[in-house]
Amino acid sequence: MSEPIELNDAWRRHALLTTHEMAAADRAAIAAGVPGERLMAAAGAAVANAIQRRWRPQPVLVLCGPGNNGGDGFVVARLLAEQQWPVRVMLFGELDQLRGDAAWAAGQWSGKVEPWQASAVGEVSLVVDAIFGAGLTRDLAPPVLDMLAAVRRSGATVCAIDVPSGVDGSTGNVRGDALHAHCTVTSFRRKPGHLLYPGREFCGELEVAPIGTPPSVWNELAWQCTAANHPDLWHQRLVQPRAADHKYDRGHVLVLGGDIMTGAARLAARAAQRLGAGLVTVAASPTVWPVYATALESIMVTPCRAEPVDEWAQLLTDERRNAILLGPGLGVGPLQRSRVMAALATQRACVLDADALSSFADDPGTLFRCLHPRTVLTPHEGEFSRIFGHMQHNKLERARRAAQRSGAVVVLKGADTVVAAPDGRTVINHNAPATLATGGTGDVLAGMIAGLVARGTPAFEASSAAVWLHGLAAQLVGPGLVADDLLRTLPSAQARLYTMITPPNIG
């Protein structure tokens, strides 16, 4: 980031902190006068409370590691034992080797500390995983792997402190192995690894506990501006319809339709309508014009010949068409490359999806030279690799680097879709159900983004909002979802959103 980004309280509220940022927050809290022992006591109390809310007293095994995560575990053990829960503690390492706050917490535990021995797990119904926290930087050692295997064989329920041991809190990568936790309790803020796969699937129900970290710590953090996607971050930038609007006030989306997979462009065009574009036009070759015209009653369909003169350039001269979508079902080749470049040359808002990106697989540099800040790229992993190459980074970092390299907003799709802006802002989406993994849903998303940017919403906020509404609409559909269902539920999803962001009338 070349310049600092001004972020409001909503960004801080939904912030995702890397392990380094979280460690810096703890140091800043201590420097501000909050003792580390108090932070650890509060973190352990939050875990103990979470356990007591979920389960009745039962045999508990607390697995403590050699650092602060283990210290939290000792606090949990003490608090549960004080409530008459039968508690055992095992320590990975030597008691006299503990330092700092972890040593203090261990000193508060008056019970036995058992040696680390996987064969001694025995009969236990609940395990507290306090071995390693989010800052794990290497693969788990064999003694820990053996213990995780023993716990898995026992069938015990698992509550993890911070993250399940083995999950990298900054990336979501699993370093050798990890237990699938029923719940995970973390402190102050979530980490990216809580939302990124595969780590996310190990966390179970995630609870974030306040532990007394003062607001002043934000002044000391070199934060990368990453947050969990939420309406708080972008709803104020959504351009709302006004009673006096006419259709051209609400934007006009131009969609380029393909000759073979005509359903993709039709889904995208309808989605742009559903997200509020006042007008949508689909341009298609005369050979398939009847297919589009018959299916799209409230959407204009115009013929677009490629020869003897490409009529696409003529369609772009109408400046009222303020948002352009290319890619869904488009096909790949030189003609499509030239049409993408012509659209980008207008400097209007452009959404490039699917084949519009793959057409530049052999020459991504040409694409990058044409991109501008009002462009949104919506690749899945395969398309991302075709134009950005195989980056050796986690998903969050790949999306961030791609946005900075291209100068466009990048929506790297998946169960944990990441939206990244060139200025460094990134969000990770976490409301998408598994039912979205079916053909056509990506075309709907591209159309949704186009509909929002046509209305005047900035590219990053439009992309974040569309991704969130896409997930909510899928939740409303439920099992058996096909892409067409999203179009029918988008009005309900938007109604839910407006209920969330509109203050109640109490006059």
Image (cartoon, rainbow, N blue to C red):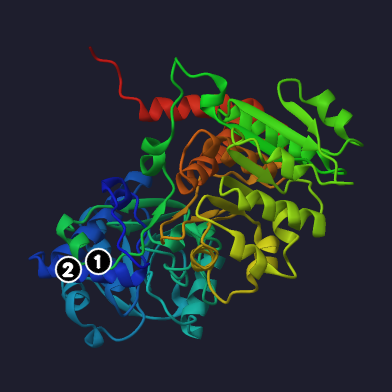
Give the x, y percent position of residue 363. Answer: 71, 70
* Residue denoted by label 1: 221
Label 2 SS: helix
**Nearer the camera: disc 2 or disc 1:** 1
Give the x, y percent position of residue 392. Answer: 57, 77
Which numbered circle lies on residue 296? none
User: Tag 2: Cα neighbours inside 10 Å, few (<14), some, or many (≥20)?
Assistant: many
The residue lying toward the viewer, choosing from 94 and 336, is 336
Give the residue at x 92% y 37%.
287
Using the numbered discs, state the Cα–Cα distance from disc 2 to disc 1 in whole angstroms.
Answer: 8 Å
> Tag 1: residue type?
Leu
Q: Which residue lies furthest to the top in this view?
A: 507
Which numbered circle lies on residue 28? 2
> Tag 2: residue type?
Ala
Whether pointer 2 and pointer 1 mark residues with C-beta atoms closer than 8 Å, the reply is: yes
- Residue 306 in the figure: left or right of residue 393: right
The residue lying toward the viewer, choosing from 211 and 8, is 8
- Residue 379 in the figure: left or right of residue 150: right
